[in-house]
Image (spheres, coloured by chain):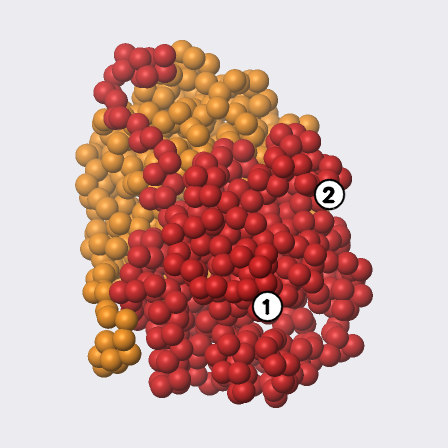
Chain colours: A red, B orange
Amino acid sequence: MAKVISMKCMKCGREETPRPDRYTCDTCGIDGILDIIYDYKSTPLTINDLERNPDRSLWRYRCMLPIEAETPVSPLQVGWTPLYKQTRLEREFGLGNVFIKDDGRNPSASLKDRASAIGVAKAIEAKAKAICAASTGNAASSLSAFAASMGIPAYIFVPKRAPRAKVAQLLVYGAHTLLIDSTYDRAFELSVEASRRYGFYSRNCAYNPYLVEGKKTVAYEIWEQLGYKIPDRVYVSIGDGCITAGLYKGFYDLVQIGLSDRLPRIIGVQAAGCNPMEVAMKTGEFKEQTPDTIADSIAVGVPRNRLKALRGLKASAGECISVTDDAIRESLVGMPRVTGVFGEPAAVTAYAGFRKQAHSGVIGNNETVVILITGNGLKDIESALSVCTMPEPIDPTFDAVEKYLR
Amino acid sequence: MAKVISMKCMKCGREETPRPDRYTCDTCGIDGILDIIYDYKSTPLTINDLERNPDRSLWRYRCMLPIEAETPVSPLQVGWTPLYKQTRLEREFGLGNVFIKDDGRNPSASLKDRASAIGVAKAIEAKAKAICAASTGNAASSLSAFAASMGIPAYIFVPKRAPRAKVAQLLVYGAHTLLIDSTYDRAFELSVEASRRYGFYSRNCAYNPYLVEGKKTVAYEIWEQLGYKIPDRVYVSIGDGCITAGLYKGFYDLVQIGLSDRLPRIIGVQAAGCNPMEVAMKTGEFKEQTPDTIADSIAVGVPRNRLKALRGLKASAGECISVTDDAIRESLVGMPRVTGVFGEPAAVTAYAGFRKQAHSGVIGNNETVVILITGNGLKDIESALSVCTMPEPIDPTFDAVEKYLR
């Protein structure tokens, strides 16, 4: 594996000795998010090896992940999700290369599975008896699936307004489910406290720095699936900021080890009703917000991983934009009809952001664009149905059928 | 591609000239289900080629599919779903080799995508302007996704009791949705009539013989993923019988081209509340039933593809068993907790059938067993929630958390 040198605080720069159950900086406390620092001279990833590697999961990049060689991992097949060329979108906007990366095809139907795969492995390294997480829904359902696949008990803290499908996943997988009568932000605090008091391994992505390392594999895949090329723009929705952080880290790794010579511009997309990252990028100041958006997975008023996400946006010459809930609703049906890919509200937020920029003409004709779809639409069908008209049942006669078809 | 010699009637044995829009036998009418007959001497599939083929989708077997070389296919990545070894199930039952094949990982979250991929390709070959299907839900949502991905209009006939998530998929993908106030069986008849009168290409799997050819790829994958070995038993739920027919056809192909020397026993599993195939296997007589089961995808009182399914069960020395809705409900949560795989009611019916036979001791210790999971649990969360207890929301304080944890 890539040799981990230290865990470095994003706030004060202090470096700590790596340990699976070290989450934040001793000096800065809970805001002292750590970054995993590698000795890039030791990393063995080569294109030659990739071409011979039959593994089609994120474990094809195991040599770049902070997991010990002998640590058992979940059998669930995660990563290596499809990257689809979008010729209809290209025609619509006069662009040359537009792709959708469908991470809703992961085991529990969201990108969060990339982090959970690492989380359960690190929990085993830490010899933890149980694992916990707070989540707006997807990280929770993901952890439940991975914990179940390894027989590890899971304790999940979710806000009670989490979509039914995500809560259903928790219950079906047998997770101990704490439905908190409050926001995600409060559920997060309670899960951190529970982790401390009961020794649960924490799979909070914006807190446990190993998890972003799982998410970074999506960047490796984009690079590899584009034929070892870096795109010009990657659109990604932002909630806590962890996926943005992971995207950046993956592309950064590739530059550090000499497999690419540049970064893509990472374009973060938020809902207008919850855009603290957009505000922070534009004003330089972070201000807590009260979320008001249909996109539950990114309804995060206090993005816990904002420092890492901001670093990724800035270092990649990216930006953060926002789209209205109306634009998100339009994309809920607009995207599947054009692409065949059904995304949940937070996922199609990235698509809506792409459309906004494509309409405004800021995307160059020759740019290669990737839209990252982070969760499957089946996770929140009520939002999808809210923008569709449920047809009236029709009589089981051919006359009725003819009438309908006319 | 494999050379297609003819389309042979399962009822009278008459052979017809192949044509993309030939569905049933001219003599026997709608009951004259056709089988695609290949010149197996012409089929070029070899293990050598497979080992060098980087394609991880059903198109890696394109040379075995009845699609012209130049026909465009949907970009949606279908097939090559994971096969998971189940060590906990092996321990529980004292068995050596138990696997779950998770076909809920397909683009629209069910095995039906294998057939839809072929369906839209054949619609293009037939130069059809639109495509239609009747379905209990999954074939419909699958067709909608594939038609959308290719820009082909879809007309869908579903019984109005189809689960919300499946109807949501139809609407999101923009299919013309006819919610028939009757059973699947009546919706099927109406779709056949509409196909005739309006020239819609028919993606009814039990009617259009090309579709079973898409489903057969799941058998190739099982063989390949087991290291070019045939399992001893494959458990599969049965509704219309098309998946059973496809499983058999795939394993049959492998024997015909000399890549395997035997068939697995195909064990069909039905819901006790709708078991016409079990009755037909045991009594030799087919009798229509009125479905009464939680497993909506297999609530089929008149299995349209019964002739092909019965052939598969008999020729493979298989059998058809049934499980109660209580056993299906138990498996809805039992399977994900042990395997990490969440299946819809009809999908876990196969798992319940495996458990029934494993408990009764008929499975030999050294047998290799594959349980085929045909659809994702996110397609019907209400059934899943009906067997879970929704937790009460708890106050956002640590005291409340402690009380819950005690």
**In front of the other: B50 or A48:** A48
Between disc 2 and disc 1, the foreground one is 1
Q: Which mark is residue A308?
A: 1
The part of the image, by quadrant, that contains residue A17 is: bottom right
Numbered disc total: 2
Q: Quadrant of the C terminus of chain B?
A: bottom left
**In front of the other: A262 or A311:** A311
| Callout 1 amino acid | Lys
**In front of the other: A74 or B46:** A74
| Residue sitting at x 59%, y 56% | A282
Residue A120 to residue B105: above or below = below
Q: Position of residue A308 (x, y in %)?
A: 59, 68
Residue A349 to residue B192: above or below = below
Q: Which mark is residue A367?
A: 2
| Residue sitting at x 61%, y 81% | A12
Q: Position of residue B25 (x, y in %)?
A: 43, 18
- Assess whether mark 1 and mark 2 are in contact (beta carbons under 8 angstroms): no
Q: Quadrant of the N terminus of chain B?
A: top right
| Callout 2 amino acid | Glu
Is residue B160 among the parts visible in the rendering?
Answer: yes
Q: Considering the numbered disc 1 on the image, is that residue within a helix, a strand or a loop? A: helix
Q: Position of residue B345 (x, y in %)?
A: 30, 49
Residue A48 to residue B124: above or below = below
Identify the subunit bearing mark 1.
A
The CA span between labels 2 and 1 is 26 Å
Along the polypeptide, which appears first: circle 2 or circle 1? 1
The part of the image, by quadrant, that contains residue A91 is: top right
Q: Considering the numbered disc 2 on the image, is that residue within a helix, a strand or a loop? A: loop
| Residue sitting at x 31%, y 21% | B189
Dot 1 crowding, Cα within 10 Å, few <14, some 14–19, many 20+: many
Is residue B307 among the parts visible in the rendering?
Answer: no
